[in-house]
Amino acid sequence: MSILVTGGAGYIGSHTAKALKKENLRPIVLDNLVYGHKYIVEEILKIPLVTGQIGDKKLLQKLLSCNHELTKDDPIQGIIHFAAYAYVGESCSDPIKYYKNNFIESFNLFETVLNQNKLSGSNIPIVFSSTCATYGLPNEIPIKENFEQKPINPYGKSKLFIEEVLKDFANAYGLSSMIFRYFNAAGADPNGSLGEDHDPETHLIPLVIKGLLEENGFINIFGNDYSTKDGTCIRDYIHVCDLADAHVLGLKKLLKEEKQVKAYPYIYNLGNGKGYSIMDVIKASENIVGKQLTTKFVKRREGDPPILVASSEKAKNELGWMPKYQNLEEIIYHAYKWHIKNEKKI
C-alpha cells in the first residue's frame, strides 16, 4: 500500500516515512527540496522520492491516477501532508510566501484529491500536519482541542486556513481527514540515523546543542521579560518519533473507515503536557554535554506566545497514542547523539 508523504524529506516527515516503512506501508515522498534533504530519502530511508511542488496538479494527478511509474502497480491509498514553510518570524516579514506555499499549494492538493476520488469512487484520506500556533495566546493551560483559535502570526493563520478547508471539504464532499496540532517537535531517532537539520536553524534544542559543541558557542535568547518563572518562553517538547507514531496511528484509523464516520475531520493535539522554559532546556543540555553555554538576552521575537502546553488526552483516549519519550533529558540526549554523529555533515 503506497502512502504519499508530502514534505517527507524534512524533519518530521522523514521520521514518519521511516515509521510507515516499519509498518510495511510504502511511503512515497513528494518534496520540493527547498528545506528537505535528498540524501535522507534516497540514502538513509531508501524510499522513492518525487521532486516537485505539492500544488502541481498535473504531477499530483499523475501520481494519484496511477499514471506515474511509482504508482502504476501500487496506487496511493493515503496522504500525510507535512509540506510547509514553518519559520514564525519569516512569516511575519514575508506573509505572501506563507499564504502562497502553505495555503494555496495545500488547496491545490486537496482539490486534486477530491477530483481523483470522484473519478475513481475512492476516498483517499489525508492526515494534516497542523500546529499549536493556531491557538495564538491561550487563556488557559493546558490547551485543549476545543479552545478558541486566534493565531498571532501568518504561519499559524496559514495552517488555520487549511484546517477550515478540510472541515468544509469533509462536510460537503465527505473527504476523510485528520488534523494534528502539535507542539514543539524535538529529539532524533534513537539510533542516530535521522535528526533535525534545518537551514537556517531556529529551533531551540539544536541551537543549544550546536552552541555547546562549538568552541566559542553562544545562543541568543529572545526575551526574558515574559510572565513566566524565569522570564523566558515556556514550551511543550514532544519527541519526533512520538509524533511519527501518532501519524501512523491516525492514518490507520482513517484507512479502516470506508467513509469518514462523521462529516468533520478528527482533530488532536500532540504534546507531552509538560512545559519547560528556555532556561530549563539550556540547563538540561548543559548537564548532558558537561559544559556551560554563553547566553545573551535580546528583544522578543515577533509572534511568540509566552506559554504553550498541550492537553493530549483526546489522542491518547481515541487513538491509543502514548508518547514513549516523555523525559526532556532523554529527548535532548537523542538530539545530541545525532548531532555528534553528523557533526561534519551539518
Image (spheres, rainbow, N blue to C red):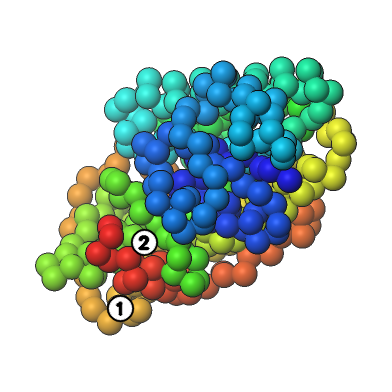
Disc 2 designates what residue?
Answer: 205
Residue 35 locus on image (x, y percent): 37, 41
Residue 313 percent coordinates (x, y): 71, 56
Q: Secondary structure at mark 1?
A: helix
Report whether 317 appears left or right of 324.
right
Residue 147 can be seen, yes or no: no
Q: Quadrant of residue 283?
A: bottom left
Residue type, mark 2 in image? Ile
Badge 1 density bin: few <14, some 14–19, many ≥20, Cα 10 Å: some
The residue under label 1 is which amino acid type?
Val
* Numbered label tally: 2
Q: Quadrant of the C terminus?
A: bottom left
- The alpha-carbon separation of the residues under discs 2 and 1 comes to 12 Å
Lateral position of residue 335 relative to residue 290, left or right: right
- Sequence order check, earlier mark of 2 and 1: 2
Q: What residue is at 63 percent from the left and 65 percent from the top?
A: 323
Residue labelled with disc 1: 289
Which of 164 and 137 lies nearest the eye of the viewer? 164
The one nearer the camera, 160 or 125, is: 125
Residue 189, horizontal then vertical, whole percent:
50, 66
Residue extending farthest to the left is: 216
